[in-house]
Image: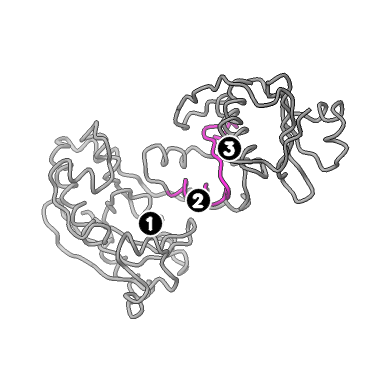
Amino acid sequence: MYAILDIETTGGKFNEEGITEIAIYKFDGHTVVDQLITLVNPEKDIQPFVVQLTGINNNMLRNAPKFHEVAKRILEITQDCIVVAHNSSFDYRILKTEYKRLGYSFKRDTLCTVELSRKLIPDKPSYSLGKLCKSIGIPMSDRHRASGDALATIQLFKLLLAKDVNKIMIENTIKHFDSKKVAEKLTGLLDSVPTIMGVYYLHRSDGQIIFMGKGNNIKNDLTNLFIKSTKRGLKIQEKTASISYEITGNLLLTNLKYFLELDFNKPKYNLRSRKRIVSENFNSDNMLLIDKGRTLDEHSVILIENNEVVGYCFTNLAFQENQMNILKEMLTPITNKALAKTIIKNYLKTKSVLKIIRM
């Protein structure tokens, strides 16, 4: 027996979302034998972009039941069922979080129709529910509403059941619950990450960097990464054992560190894209690019000599910038000078730094 479901949420920070609508269809492999469709009052505001996406707004939920009022019914309709959803890791995580707030541990086996579709309907350009259903002729109504998406998932699941003649794929794709959940691990890792500009690194258990990213707010950036439902996103979430980061203080140094280290480390899950190397020279052969540092009393400094990028450092004393022999001792050297020049030239075409000292 299967419980095919879809959940709409408020959006927001990882594991702080609230349910706004849930639809569950109990499916015996042939027909729907029971169903639950209801709006839910999440007791928090819905993010504006979610209102635009789903059409569900705060006023619609004012008199809707709160989660604790529908929790028992959800337990009943999913009892002894495999929970099926399109990107089941998301829906299952949301349900587990809601029950955890009530002091209850929600445990069900799950099956993801995204993963199953990749195996049984290969080589599609997209496996999002809307695009996949359109490509295989499954009609959809009420897109991004729980009932509409769940009904489309039923039709998709019927097709997948028919294609999986020996039911080998189905059995291999079912995920059995265990105590060590990816969501709990990621929540713990996020606790130590600051809301500040920088470059971050995701490591697997042996310390190897598997993914790099950058952002104005690295905690928000990681939160968005950890709720992605793409095949690559789910792999990153599964393999990440630890997070490290470096605060950069300004956008130029963020870009410089990110692209140079991306080129050097070549993390497994970063998408590869080659930058077109800029050949023209800087306006001055020798100069210092000075910009904001990691703290209010600090500067970042990039040294350019003989039209090549030598290195970068952070200074908090004026004489460090004025005495070249001291400054050079502080520099982190740059080896890929052509890439560094390209990053800096492209940046300076549209943006500026605090100060340029030509020498």
Horizontal side of residue 311 vs 118, given as left or right: right
| Residue position for label 3 | 201
Measured as percent of width and height from the top left, residue 144 is found at: 27, 58
Horizontal side of residue 251 vs 183, given as left or right: right
Q: Quote the CA–CA distance across marks 1 and 2.
A: 24 Å
Nearest to N terminus: mark 3 or mark 2: 3
Residue 112 shown in magenta: no
Q: Please tell me whether mark 1 or mark 2 is closer to you in this view.
A: 2
Tell me if I can see residue 62 in this picture: yes
Image quarter where the N terminus lies is: bottom left
Measured as percent of width and height from the top left, residue 89 is found at: 37, 49
Name the mark on residue 107. 1
Q: Amino acid at mark 3?
A: Tyr
Residue 225 shown in magenta: yes
Tell me if I can see residue 189 in this picture: no
Q: Quote the CA–CA distance across marks 3 and 2.
A: 14 Å
Neighbours of disc 2 within 10 Å: few (<14), some (14-19), many (20+) = some
- Range of residues picked out in magenta: 200-227
Name the mark on residue 223. 2
